[in-house]
Image (cartoon, rainbow, N blue to C red):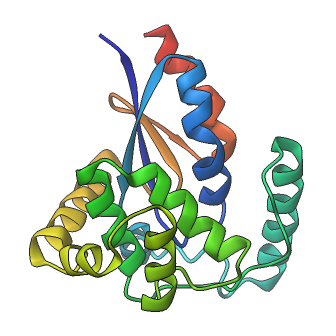
Amino acid sequence: MQHQIEFFYFIGSTYSYLSVMRAQALAAKEGVALVWRPFSVRTLMREQNNVPFATKPVKMKYMWRDLERRAARFGVPFDGIPPYPIDPNETANHVATLAAREGWCPEFTQAAYRAWFLGKQDPGTEASLRETLGSIGQDAQACLLRAGEEATKQEYLARTDRARQLGLFGSPTFVVGEEIFWGDDRLEDALAWCRAQ
């Protein structure tokens, strides 16, 4: 039986950029299956009265610099501060939910983050989504229609509810069974724990 890590993330989470760009390759190297789980961390953070940066300019300044340092360390492209916050309707995450169901989630999520961090676009706008979907060979019109269906939105809510039940509070979070590892800086810990089981 192959080792497995569930990768809970939210397109809109800054530190998730690093994990989105590096987790798949690291997991493959370790012989671990990475299962992509888009969820609404924004919903959980509101429930928990957990506002990380929006009202905390000093912390936000640190976060961007820390992210830049970590990106340089891991060879992940970083070209200045992207727009933030983004995608108020969480549309990119609905598309990611569809992509997870249909098997093209890593490609879509990486492309969405490139549009955000490198293209400086809000990845949840229709124009950005059309460009992103086209860049990975998907039919943008058809995908946007399926992503907007009630079934997809309910699937996203169900994934968020599972995250709630697991006790998640941030993105990215790596889940091995019932063990949770929060933050890009815990990716290697999650892989080591997974391999040890």
Q: Position of residue 101 (x, y in %)?
A: 23, 52
Q: Position of residue 180 (x, y in %)?
A: 45, 38
Residue 73 in view in this figure = yes
Q: Position of residue 141 (x, y in %)?
A: 29, 82
Q: Is residue 183 left or right of residue 88?
A: right
Q: Is residue 59 left or right of residue 142?
A: right
Residue in the picture at 21% in, 67% down: 157
Q: Position of residue 33 (x, y in %)?
A: 41, 27
Residue in the picture at 81% in, 70% down: 64
The picture quadrant where one finds residue 46 is: bottom left
Residue in the picture at 52% in, 84% down: 128
Q: Is residue 192 left or right of residue 78?
A: left
Q: Is residue 141 left or right of residue 104?
A: left
Placement of the C terminus among the 4 image quadrants: top left
Task: Pick out the residue farthest to the left.
Answer: 151
Placement of the N terminus among the 4 image quadrants: top left
Residue 13 in view in this figure = no
Looking at the image, how many numbered discs can be counted on the residues? 0
Q: Is residue 120 above or below residue 21?
A: below
Q: Is residue 53 above or below residue 182?
A: below
Q: Is residue 105 above or below residue 192?
A: below
Residue in the picture at 47% in, 61% down: 136
Q: Nearer the viewer, residue 147 or 72?
A: 147
